[in-house]
Amino acid sequence: MTTTAADTWVGQRLRRKEDARLVRGAGRFTPDVVVPGALHAAVLRSPFAHAEITSLDVAPALRVEGVVAAFTGADLAGRVGTFVEAAGKEITPQLQALVDVEVKSCPLSPIAHGRTLWVGQPVAVVVARDRYAAEDGLEAIEADYEPLEAIPDPELALRDGAPVLHEELGDNVAARLAMASGDVDAAFAHAPHVLRERFTFGRSAGNAMETRSVQASWDEGRDELTVWITSPRPHLIRTNLSEMLGLPLERIRVIAPDIGGSFGTGLFGEDALIPYLAMTLRHPVRWTEDRQEALLGTRHCRDQVHDLELAYDDDGRILALRDSFLVDAGAYNLYAVTVSYNTAAHLRGQYAIDTFSIEGRNVVTTKAPVAPVRGAGRPEGVFALDRALDLIAAECGLDPADVRRRNLIPAEEMPRPMGMPYRDGAEMVYDSGDYPAQLEQALEAFGYDELRARQAEWRAAGRYVGVGISSYVEGSGFGPYDGAIVRLDQRGNLHVVTGAKPHGQGLETTLAQVCADEFGLPPERITVTSGDTSLLQFGVGTFASRSAVTAGSAVGIASQRLRDKVLAVAGELLEASPADLVIGDEGVASRDVADHSVTFAEIHSAAAPGPKSRLPAGLEPGLAVEYYFVPPTVTFASGTHVASVEVDPETGFVRVLRYLTVDDCGRMLNPTIVEGQIQGGVAHGIGTALFEGVLYDEDCQLLTGSYMDYLLPTSAEVPPIEVGHQEYLSDLNPFGIKGCGEGGAVSPPAAIANAVVDALRPLRINVNRVPLGPETLLDLIAQARALEGGERREEVAS
Amino acid sequence: MIATAPREVVLRVNGVEHRGFAEPRVTLVDFLRDELGLTGTHVGCEHGVCGACTILLDGRTVRSCLMLAVQAEGHELRTVEGLAPADEPLHPIQEAFSEKHGLQCGFCTPGFLMSVEELLRDDPDPSEETIRSRLSGNICRCTGYQNIVEAVRYAAELTREAAA
C-alpha cells in the first residue's frame, strides 16, 4: 500500500484494499459460502414465449434419485407474493403533479402459473441433494404447453387486435410519460429545416461475469431467515422478501458477499423463491444460475426505438426537439419509468435545447423483462441525438465538431435549469461543468484536426478511417440516501459499515480514503464492510452511479462526528480543549504540551458505559457514529468521447483504432479507480456498439443463448482507452463528488456509429441502429453502392 | 438419468495430493470447488468461452468447466490458490494485477492469473499484441482490459527482475 505523506488521502492513487483477497482467490462470492447440508435447486424454464401451460406434473421428478421436492406456480400461489417492484412506488406525488406520467402495475410471480410470457420464465423448481440430481429431476417433469401468439416487437404489441398480454393493463402499454417545454409546434412550423429520423437501439444484456446466486437458511427456533445473494442492494432485497414472504424486516438478514460485477440492478424470481424453499423445506437451499439461464433473461437491457425530429437553422443550431420513443419492456415492466425517464431526462445531453416535447411508452412484449443496466436509458437517447447532430452537420456542410460547438450549453449559463423535473421530483439543473471546454480538451488531446487532415490521404490510399464524437451528461448520486456507521476500536482502528454494496467499484478503498481524511488516521487502519443488513438499519445500494456521492458523503460526515467525539472524550481526560488536541498513531495528544496524551484504549474505556465512564456531560457512551446522507437531488457528471475507427468495406468489420474520453466526475476520490470505471464502461459501450445483441426470432425464441452467439468484447477488440479529466466540484454534497460508474458506457455507441459513418463518407451511408455488426454494415455498404451505381446509370441515361 | 456411482479421484493440486469422490459426470471445476473446497476457481459460463475457470493441468491451461473430474485422475493441477501460499507475499502476477489495478470485481481474475502464468513462461517479455491475443480467451467485463495488459507487462518485468 502506498503510504506517502499527503495533504489528503482523497485524490491519491491508492492501491485497492480489496485486491489482497481477490488476487489470492480468497474472495468469498455467494456460491463460495458453505451452508452445511444445503440442498440444491434447479429451475425448469418455459421453452415457449407465450404459452398456456396445459399440464404440468412434477411427480415423476420426485421419483428421481436424490430429488427431495418439486414445486410449481400453483404450489406457490397464495404463499409467495409478487414482484411489483418500483411500479407505482417510485412516482412521488410531486413528480406526478409536474409531469404527465402513468405507471400501471403488472405483478410478477416467482414461478409462472397457468401461462408463460417469455422463453426462460420459471415454470417449476426441483430441490435435490446436488445440482446434478436437481437437473435430472427437471428432465423428468412432464409439461405440456399450448403456444399462443408471440409478440416480438413493441410496434406489433400496439397494433389493433394484438393480444393483450396482461388483462389488468387494458392494453400493452405498461407505462408512459410525456414532458414538454416551449412552443414546440410553432418552432417546427417556422424552422428553416427539420430532420426526421428513426433510431433503433437493440437489446443487449449486462453480462456480469458472475451469474446470479441465492442461498437461504431458515432458523426455525428463532424464526429467522438468512439469505446470501449476489445483489448490490441487500436492504432493498430484504424489503422485498419481507413483503413477498410475509416476514417482518427484523426477522430477515440479507448478506451480499463479494459480487462478480453487476452492471445493472434487478429483482428476480429466484430471490424470493429460494428463501421460500428454505422456509418450507426447513432446510438450507442454494441455487446458482448457469450461463444459459443468465442469457435467457438476466438483465436484458436497452431495446428502444426513437422517432426523433429536430428543427434547426441554416447554421446547424437546434431550435426544437420532438421525440417519441418506445421501450420494449419485455413481458413485465418491473422498473416503472426508471429507464424511460432517464432516457427523456438525458436525451438533450450537453446541448442547449429549451423547446422540446418528449414522450415515451414502455410496451410489453413476449421477451424477457428488461432491467436498468449501466447507463440505464442514457445510451439510447445519446445515440439518437448525437447521430442526428452528425446528420445535421452533413446537411449544413459543417464539421461534426462545429455543429457541437454551436449547440453546447455555454459555461457561463451554469448552473442551468433544464425545464423539467428530474425523476426524484426536484427541478432538473445541470449543477456545474464546462462542456465547450470539455469538447476542446478532448479534440485537442485526440489530435482531431490532424486526423481530419490525414483522412483525405488515407481515403486516397483506399483506407476507410473515420472519427466520431459523442457527449453525455449523467444525473448521478441518486437518492434517497445511503448511510454509514464509523466505529473506533481500542487499538485505534476504524471500522466503517455502509449500506452501499460494491461489486467492483473499490469502495473498500475509496471510502477508507474519505474516512482517513475526515478522521485523521491512515487508510490502512480503516476497514470498510458492507452488504449485511444486520450491520446497518437502513441502506439503499450500489447502482445509478450513486455510492461515492451518497455513501462517500455519509462516511465523511460520520467520520467527522466521530473525530469530534473522540477529541471531546480525550479533552475530558487531558483537561484540554478539543481544539488543542490532535489525533496521532497511538491516541490523542496535545498540540502544545509535550508528552500530554491519551491512548486509544484509554479513550475507548472512558467512552464505555459504566462506573469507569468519563464522558463529557451530554455525550452518550460509545465510539460509533451512524449517519445517513440525503442528497437534495442528483449532481450532473458529464463526458465527451472521441473515437476513430477503420472499416473494412469488404468484411464489414470495424476496428476501433483509438478511443479517448474527457470526463467530469467532480472530486475524484481515487483517480486510478475512476479511470478503471471509465475504461470498463467504454469497453462495455464498444460491445454495445459493435458486438452485443440479444436476438429473438419471430416466435420470440432466443437466438443468442451462448457466448458463441452473444459476443462480448475481449482484449483483442478493445483498444487502449485514453482518459482525461475535468474536475468541477459538485456543491450538492460536502465533498464535491459526482458519480462515474456509468458514463463510460453511455457514449460509445454514438461515437463509434458517427466514426463509422465518417469513415464511409464517400459511400454516404447512414447508421441509425446498433449493434452495428458486420452483416448490418455490409448491407448498408451494398445499398450505398447500389444507389451510387443507380445514380451513375441515371446520369448516363440522361 | 446418467448418474452412476461416485468414483474416487486422486490428483495433485498445488503440490499436494488430494482424494475425493465424484460421479463420472461431475466437471473438474465442480470437483475442485465442492469436493476439495478450492473456491478460488470460478464458474463463469460452463461452455468454455469466458475463461473464469482456467487452471493449469500439467503446466498447460485448461478450462476446468470443460473437463470431467475423472479425466484429471493422476494429473498435476495448479489453481490460483497455488500461486502464493496464504502467509507468503503475493506472486509477481498477483502483485502486478493489484499494483496496476488490473481487477475490479475480481471474479474473472483467477482465470486471468493462470493464463498469464502460462503466457509468461512461454514468453517472458510479451508484446502488447501478444498479450492481447493470448488473453482473448478470458473475458473481463469490468476493466476494459487496458490495466490487465499493463499488469501483464509489469508482471513480466517483476519476473525478469526476480530471475536476474
Image (cartoon, rainbow, N blue to C red):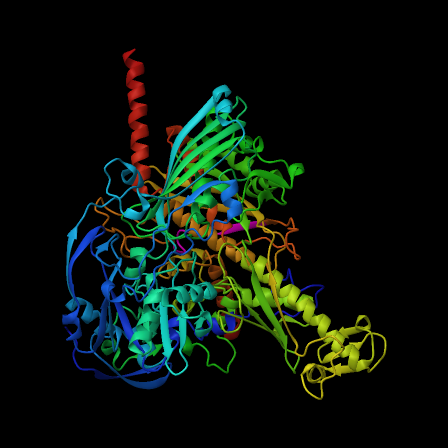
Residue A669 pos. (x, y %): 61, 59
Q: Which residues are magenta?
A: A714-724
Is residue A279 a member of the stretch shown in magenta?
A: no
The verdict on residue A718 being magenta is: yes
- In the rendered image, the residue lying farthest to the right is A593
Q: Is A97 placed above or below B130 here? A: above
The quadrant of the rendering that contains the N terminus of chain A is bottom right
- Whether residue A168 is visible: yes
Q: Depth check: give the residue in front, A600 or A150.
A: A150
The correct choice, above or below, for A578 with respect to A754 in the image is below
The image quarter containing residue A172 is top left
Residue B131 position within the rendered picture, expressed as x and y whole percent measured from the top left = 42, 60
Q: Tell me if residue A397 can be seen.
A: no
Q: Which residue is depicted at the point 18% across and 71% down?
A: A136
x and y, in percent, of residue B56 in the image? 34, 73
Tell me if residue A450 comes above or below residue B152 in the rendering: above
By secondary structure, the bulk of the magenta-drawn segment is best described as loop
Q: Report the number of discs.
A: 0
Image position of A666 (left or right of A463): right
- Tell me if A349 is positioned left or right of A248 in this view: right
Q: Nearer the viewer, residue B48 or A271?
A: A271
Q: Nearer the viewer, residue A464 or A607?
A: A607
In the displayed structure, would residue B26 be above or below residue A791? below
Q: Is residue A37 left or right of residue A671?
A: left
Q: Position of residue A689 (x, y in %)?
A: 40, 45
Question: To which quarter of the image does residue A159 belong?
Answer: top left
Residue at 28%, 55% in the rendered image: A708
